[in-house]
Image (spheres, grey):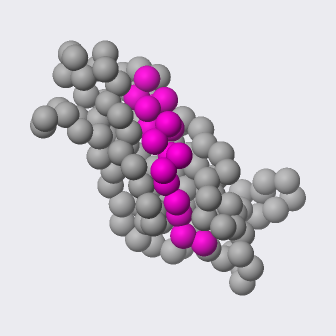
């Protein structure tokens, strides 16, 4: 069986804080923020046919309303298709609303995707 899976845990303390357009934005490490809704990526057909395994790491910007406002593929191994598949699955995702310094705000979360043959 082929699958693409996610791994999460919870921790509200940001890994770091970055400046985005003169705004402080907390950055959470993989597993620190649990999404409210997810969707598994579609395993790319060329990889599935050859039982190729790999992973992708996405950096996701989440708006104050919990909607994804942007994403970037940080790593995709063995090829870019796994990152593209992971990124395409984000259309179904939603994250919790969070506050920073007592106000609703944006945040960045890093999410790993594992593509494996089971």
Question: In the image, what residue occupies the spot 45% across and 66% down?
Answer: 36
Q: Residue furthest right?
A: 22
On screen, residue 81 above or below 105: above
Residue 64 rendering spot, x and y as whole percentages: 69, 67
Q: Position of residue 83 (x, y in %)?
A: 46, 31
- Pick the residue in front: 54 or 43: 43
Tell me where residue 28 sits by quadrant.
Answer: bottom right
> Magenta region: which residues?
81-97
- Majority secondary structure of the magenta segment? helix
Residue drawn at x 32%, y 55% is 7
Residue 101, by quadrant, is bottom right
Number of on-image labels: 0
Left or right of 84 on screen, residue 117: left
Q: Residue at horizontal 52%, vertical 60%? A: 94
The quarter of the picture where residue 1 lies is top left
Question: Viewed as shown, does residue 53 lie left or right of 107?
Answer: left
């Amino acid at each position: 069986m082929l699958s693409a899976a996610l791994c999460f845990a919870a921790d509200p303390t940001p890994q770091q804080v970055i400046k985005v357009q003169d705004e402080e934005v907390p950055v959470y490490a993989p597993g620190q923020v649990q999404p409210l809704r997810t969707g598994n990526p579609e395993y790319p057909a060329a990889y599935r046919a050859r039982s190729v395994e790999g992973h992708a790491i996405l950096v996701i910007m989440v708006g104050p309303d919990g909607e994804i406002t942007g994403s970037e593929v940080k790593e995709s191994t063995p090829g870019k298709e796994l990152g593209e598949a992971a990124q395409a699955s984000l259309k179904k995702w939603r994250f919790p609303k969070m506050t920073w310094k007592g106000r609703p705000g944006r945040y960045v979360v890093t999410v790993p995707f594992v593509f494996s043959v089971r």
